[in-house]
Amino acid sequence: MSRLAEYRKLEQQLAAQMAELEAMKDDTALKTEMEFENKLRALLGEYGYSLRNVVEILDPQSGSRGAGAVAAQEKTTRKPRQVKIYKNPHSGETVETKGGNHALLKAWKTEHGSDTVESWRSQ
């Protein structure tokens, strides 16, 4: 493309953008938004606040939403599991466990049924 053609193309684009800009100047919604922004900036200046301060006041959590948000939150600890004691009335064997993943307990549940073994629980 020649320099003259490029120049004319840019000139046409500029004229189209200028027409669009003139049309937007008459838009009442734009005027209202601009008026709001001017008043807000004047108010911020009057009180010595920045937009960042206002966001922090309105949404205190916004600053901690980054990667350090998890580290900033306090870690909660789970309540320790309670020791459960099962006594097999057939064999007299006793099992102490904090969870249900005990091999002998699983064997009993397979052999006698889960509800029956739970009835053997003393604590």
Image (spheres, grey):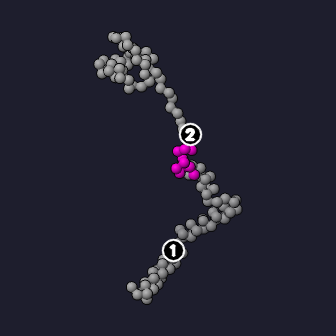
Instruction: Please rate how many residues cluster around mark 1, counting C-alpha atoms within 10 Å: few if below 14, some from 14 to 19, many from 20.
Output: few
Confirm whether residue 50 shows in the render: yes
Q: Is residue 67 magenta?
A: yes
Mark 1 or mark 2, whichever is nearer to me: 2
Which label number is shown at residue 74?
A: 2
Q: Which residues are magenta?
A: 63-74
Which quarter shows the N terminus? bottom left
Comparing 94 with 63, the one in front is 94
* Amino acid of disc 2: Glu
Rendered image quadrant of residue 48? bottom right
Q: Residue at x 66, y 61 (%)?
A: 44
Q: Residue at x 66, y 65 (%)?
A: 42
Give the image location of residue 71, x and y in percent: 55, 44
Residue sticking out furthest to the bottom: 4
Comparing 69 with 56, the one in front is 69
Give the image location of residue 18, x and y in percent: 50, 80
Which label number is shown at residue 24?
A: 1
